[in-house]
Amino acid sequence: MFADTKPLPTDPILGLTKLFQDDPRPEKIDLGVGVYRDLKGVTPVMKAVAQAEANVIAKQSTKAYTPMDGAPGFGPAILDLVFGKDSDILSAGRAVAVQAPGGSGALRLAGELANSQGAASLTLGEPTWPNHVPLLSAAGLKLNSIPYYDRDAHAVDFEAFKAGVAKLGPKDVLLLHGCCHNPTGADLSTDQIDEIAKMAAAQGFLPLVDTAYHGFATDLDADAYMVRKFSAELPEVLITYSCSKNFGLYRERTGALIYVGPKTENALAVKSHATSLARRNYSMPPAHGGAIVAEVLGDPALTALWREELAEMAERVRGNRRLLAKTGEKFGLHNQLSFVADQAGMFSLLPLTDDQLRAMRDDYGVYIVGGGRINLCGVNESNVEHLVSSFKAATAS
């Protein structure tokens, strides 16, 4: 059966990482891989997570299966985090959560759930996280794209985006980034979110809010504005949630699919369909990461420590943005990089052509993925001048 199977091309980001690792130049810079990294280039285990993990292991008496909806305590803890403990959404029983294998698993589950309920299409703003397309198309959904980002203005093209959204109807799903848009770093403003909420209420389309960087833009409450606004004003919302970035649980594959319905009965019915779909796919999610999150959020001292660590991580990324913009001005680039300071999250798109990206890599050892997406975690005081001088040289012609 597999005798004539040919190898597929290497994943472009993983391939870039291999090139970086093989590069002997000491001044090389890796701006590719999409994970948080500290000043030493390490993706750390958060102190709150390490303590929670020790607690979980100490209390663990079995490796038996956990329920299909996730590790005990995980779902309620995530719902409290997303909506706030005093949320009317939660007191009314309108929201349910199903743990999934990471945010990617939650997206696939959301796609299958929407497809099973007769969704006509799913619409994505362009550009979006590249893995959105294979994950959601594999779930059987017809995908459409509409403009989202103006590369010349380095900002959301809201009029073009709104024009695309205006075409959606009751059987359509619209995917939005909850905050820290990947790959652009350009988020919708609160006023723009409010406008999309009004359009959803009038037209009947279903928002699917991908929440992968909760806490990395402003803070945990401000970053939940879209989710909370939609849930308060619309009868139904789908939300995918990742604990990879804000808990640093990348390899533990910890995420959630959240559904908000008009009333408790609807929410529980949809949860039953989501768990049935999960059963056909992966049966139940990995328990370890979910147990850690439940432990962190269930212990006030650990929650406080985790919030402090997350705030420090987010501020480091914001500081790197300011540093890059300021250094660009120092090198005479005027406003060519200033937009970076006004964006949010770990990513931005630098205005680079394919030839300029190749020059950055081959001539200067600066590794950036196709399209110009950079991970701001790779910027620091020791390399920013080399980065900016390389950018200036590569874009001079």
Image (cartoon, grey):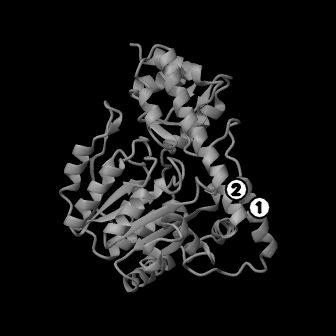
In this rendering, would 73 be left or right of 348? right
Q: Which residue lies furthest to the front in this view?
A: 86
Q: Marks 2 and 1, how far apart in space?
A: 10 Å
The percent coordinates of residue 232 (x first, y second) are 36, 68
- Viewer-closest of 80 and 113: 80
In this rendering, would 9 be left or right of 305? left
**Mark 2, secondary structure of its residue:** helix
Say if 244 sits above or below 90 in the image. above
The percent coordinates of residue 325 (x first, y second) are 49, 26
In this rendering, would 233 be left or right of 160? right
Whether residue 1 can be seen here:
no
**Mark 1, secondary structure of its residue:** helix
Q: Identify the residue at horizontal 51%, vertical 45% (top origin).
A: 11
> Which of labels 2 and 1 is toward the front?
2
| Amino acid, disc 1 | Gln
Q: Residues within 10 Å of mark 1 (few under 14, many from 20)?
A: some
Say if 15 sits above or below 70 in the image. above
The percent coordinates of residue 253 (x first, y second) are 59, 62
- Viewer-closest of 200 and 375: 200
**Residue assigned mark 1:** 51
Q: Residues within 10 Å of mark 2 (few under 14, many from 20)?
A: some
Say if 387 sits above or below 282 in the image. above
**Residue assigned mark 2:** 305
The percent coordinates of residue 191 (x first, y second) are 31, 50
Query: Would you identify the image quadrant in which residue 208 lies?
Result: bottom left
- Viewer-closest of 212 and 394: 212
Q: Identify the residue at horizontal 34%, vertical 76% (top origin).
A: 116
Q: Which residue lies furthest to the bottom in this view?
A: 265
Q: Do the residues labelled 2 and 1 touch (CB within 8 Å)?
A: yes
Point out the image quarter for the C terminus. top left
Numbered marks: total: 2
Whether residue 56 can be seen here:
yes
